[in-house]
Image (cartoon, rainbow, N blue to C red):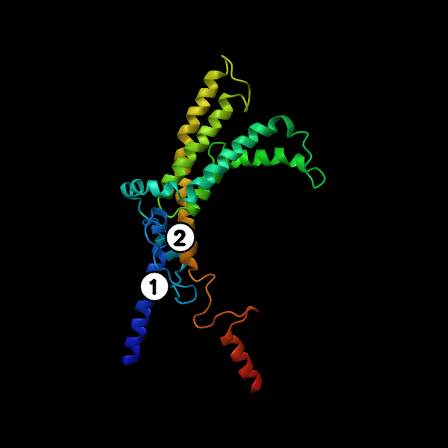
Amino acid sequence: MARAKRTDRSEARRRHRSEQALAGIDEGGLDSSEVGGPAPERPTPGTTTAVRRGFATAFREAFRPVDVRSDLRALPGLVRNRALWVPVLLTIVSAWLFVAVRPGETLATAQCGLDRPGGCLPVLATFLFQYFIVTPAIGGVFIAGFMAPRASWLLGLIVGIVAATAYAFLVLNGYIGLAPTETTQPLAQDVVIASYVISPIVGSFFASTAAWYRRFLYLSNPNRGRGRPGAPPRPDGRSRARGASEKAGARR
């Protein structure tokens, strides 16, 4: 009976540690280091073991409700987070490279290779343009959602607006398609309006999906990258406990 009680208590402690570890990647909480507060104490890798969920359980528990008010209040701290400025910077660089290289004029004759590194720029500019600027810009919003400490939908919306602005700049200045004239100007304006409508909405959805996928991966394998407790690794990659057991077996 006493052994059964100790087993139940150990299982309860493991569940509690697992919930605390999951709270660190939860969309409902922002690291205090991002908002200027003291850094929370985190468990040392290898000292705790989180409970691994099954596929269906991890799939279900990875969903989080959206708290719009709390996410908006956390926006000043999120602006300084790399989850926002990294995809925004990539979007701006992609637009600048597209303007500088003009891949629409040079891609057909570009020869990319080790002997012609300059010929790879049109290919790179086209790749970045397709993933970070063209509506819907899924590259930047996926990065934002996967790296977001919380409010992934809000970061995806902001990155979508930035991508729509870059796309509108390229369209209205004639870097994409025909040069704006009296005939093509209404069409260009319709494209810009559609970009400002589609990119933020799709960006919010894709960023939320990326955040869900990150939580799903953690719940499916929460102990990935952690060593066994009480067995610090040696320089050769082996643990002391394993080396001792191997030596004992050799003596026998």
Which residue does the numbered mark 1 point to in the structure image?
17
Q: Alpha carbon of mark 1 to alpha carbon of mark 2: how far?
A: 16 Å
Circle 2 — which element? helix
Corner quadrant of residue 45: bottom left
Q: Tag 2: Cα neighbours inside 10 Å, few (<14), some, or many (≥20)? A: many
Residue 64 image offset from top left, x and y in percent? 33, 49
Residue 179 image offset from top left, x and y in percent? 54, 18
Q: Nearer the viewer, mark 1 or mark 2?
A: 1
Q: Does residue 210 appear anywhere in the picture?
A: no
Q: Is residue 121 above or below residue 51?
A: above
Q: Residue at the location (68% across, 29% down)?
A: 109
Disc 2 residue type?
Arg
Disc 1 residue type?
Arg
Q: Nearer the viewer, residue 45 or 59?
A: 45
Q: Residue at the location (69% across, 40% down)?
A: 113
Which residue does the numbered mark 2 point to in the structure image?
215
- Counting residues from the N terminus, which is met first, the one under dot 1 or under dot 2? 1
Circle 1 — which element? helix
Number of numbered discs: 2
Q: Nearer the viewer, residue 199 or 175?
A: 175
Q: Tag 1: Cα neighbours inside 10 Å, few (<14), some, or many (≥20)? A: some
Disc ID at residue 92: none
Residue 202 image offset from top left, x and y in percent? 41, 36
Query: Split into 4 quadrants, where in the image is the N terminus?
Result: bottom left
Q: Residue at the location (42% across, 51% down)?
A: 214
Q: Nearer the viewer, residue 199 or 25?
A: 25
Corner quadrant of residue 103: top right
Q: Residue at the location (36% across, 57% down)?
A: 22
